Image (spheres, coloured by chain):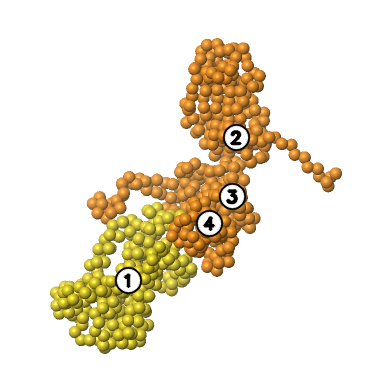
Amino acid sequence: MTATIAEYRSHRELLSNLTLRELRSKYKRSVLGWAWSTINPVVYMVVYTVVFKYFMHVKIEPKVPPPSGLNVYALFLLCAMLPFSYFQNSVLGSLTSLTSNSNLIKKTYFPRELLPASTVIANLVSHAIEMSLLLVALLAFGDWRALVYLPLTLVFMLLLAVFALGLGLALSALNVYFRDIEHFVGILFLVWFFMTPIVYSFDTLGSAAKPWVVDLLKVNPMTDATLCFRNTLYNGTLPGWLEFGYFAAFAIGSFFVGRAIFNRLEGGLAEEL
Amino acid sequence: MTVDRDVAVEANQVSKKFKLIHERNQSIKAAIMRGRRTISEDFWALRDVSFQVHRGETFGLIGENGSGKSTMLKCLTRILRPTQGSVSVEGKVSALLELGAGFHPELSGRENVFLNGAILGLSQKELRSRFDEIVDFAGIGQFIDEPVKNYSSGMYVRLGFSVAINVDPDVLFVDEVLAVGDEAFQRKCNEKFAELRRAGKTIVLVSHGMAGVQNLCDRVAWFSHGQLIQLGNPREVIEAYTGTVQSDRQVDQQGHNRWGSGEGRITDVRFVDEAGDRTTRVRSGESATLRLDYEMSAPIERPVFGIAISTLEGFNVTGPNSRDAGCVPQALDGTGHVDITFDPVLLLPGSYDLTVSLHDYTCLHPYDFRQNVLRFDVDRGPIGENVGVVSLAPKWRIDDPVTD
């Protein structure tokens, strides 16, 4: 573990350069530039709120208002949706980070791992901006507890980044060999999004849904991640140890497995691309 | 193996296998259906290659296209991983494989310098202190804040070269990129290389320009079909290499452009030694004899033989004929030969094409004209010059004030 961190540290300048490249090139030649990274989740928030709350009249918020006293569906949604879309963007972005930088891989040498890593970090930067805006909104609605639990939220964000990196490492290397993965993972994330209690609450679902659906949701580590985020941000409570433990174990486990897969496939990348 | 100096680069029994792919299944469906990912054939681009490059040495890799020298370079720079064997490189490495390879077209020159420098292993601090030097060297000037996609191709490679060369590497790998930019930039590059050599840096380069290799390198390795054929003194290795290439050439030069009325024909063209046997030895500053065999089907009055020697780019170096030399027989019939002796050969080392002709006395009617019938190499000999294509055999005199 310490060796891994030391390795990343030794390449931190290159990593920060690649991250900057990612950030700079993302919104080059667009008028709104960085604003796009916040416009996206806001539009999603509006769409989901309108569809579920006003078209379908679905009662999806928790029955009992949380200790924070909040009862705003839009915030309820954002507290889970922002982390999930960060996760999704990071995985999908790092997935193509090797194939879209084939020129760099074929003509220069540097640890290739830095390409998915820089994508995850670049996304983390825009995610942090979104989360700060969310925090401001939560405070405006009187949820001062979100500020108290902020250190914990930061830990969750870091764990989510590690989770995304693990998945991104494995999938990016595999995608060099099988380009299907790109398309497959896109669909997978659509299913994954709805199999995670983001637009609805896990508690209200419990009574309505079939038991196997609930079981599936329980297996999904993103459920636990979502519960963690929603607890510290929206509810203003500590997450359960079980949820936190499951999420953390999955994140760290995925990092080491993903890295092992990446290291195995790394040698052949320049030839395959 | 004696290690009397420090070893900077070592290749230890390196082999590299590529798959020549006949059918590629880049989808999971196809891979599962066929039970394998590709139908392929193994191709060994490198076979059991070992060598050491000493610290401070300039080391050349030569060979024909596909001989494995570029694969070797990619293994040394860790872009490719050898199938068997190992490589080790001591110290900070920089590689000039493709200039500006890491540039992002939308980013400015400045941003790309920092990015590319970081890829090559420079710290931000080092980059900041060398930034002006890098931009000056590339001659980019005020364009440094423009996106590099707006650069001319010359500016693009100059900036790439400038970053790579200013990394101040211990070991520099160069793949045939010395010919960048205009003449002024070339001169700057050569000065930079000389500076690196003086500073005791190790340079490993791949090149097809034999004159450059011979001038720059301390040792040369010759690759052919993935194997290391010969390693050693540049002159000997290059001579051995050009020797084999030359004998290959004559064959595929047969039957190129030929015209004429055909009453008389030039049947063979070759260099001959004193005994009259075919030879390929032509050395700058030594004598050489070119022999043209002819065959006349009818007596030809006052025939004129001519030859022309041109560079591979088609520039005519010289084009003498027998009439201008005042050597015109009354008539020729049957078979025989004409000898043209150069004593000495004033051509400088390089490859040349030879055209031969047989005309009537007016030089307007061709009996036989054979264009580029022979490609030959002039090897290094007593004439030590290397600029241009010919020597004017100058005599130098410098009075030495000490002995006077």
Kind of residue sitting beneath label 4: Leu
Dot 3 alpha-carbon crowd within 10 angstroms: few under 14, some 14 to 19, many 20 or more: some
Labels 2 and 4 positioned on one and the same chain: yes
Labels 2 and 1 positioned on one and the same chain: no
Instruction: Identify residue for label 3.
Output: B186
Instruction: Name the disc covering residue B378, or none.
Output: 2
Instruction: Identify residue for label 4.
Output: B159
Placement of B262 over or under B67, stated as above or below: above
Kind of residue sitting beneath label 2: Val
Q: Nearer the viewer, mark 1 or mark 3?
A: 1
Disc 4 secondary structure class: helix
Q: CA distance from mark 2 to mark 1?
A: 70 Å
Residue B54: image x %, image y %?
59, 54
Kind of residue sitting beneath label 3: Gln
Q: Are marks 2 and 1 in contact (CB under 8 Å)?
A: no
Q: CA distance from mark 3 to mark 4?
A: 13 Å
Q: CA distance from mark 2 to mark 4?
A: 37 Å
Q: Disc 1 sits on a residue from what chain?
A: A
Choose top left, top right, bottom left or bottom right for residue A52. Answer: bottom left
Report how many numbered discs are placed on residues in the image.
4
Judge left or right: residue A269 versus residue B143: left
Q: Which is nearer the N-term, disc 2 or disc 4?
A: 4
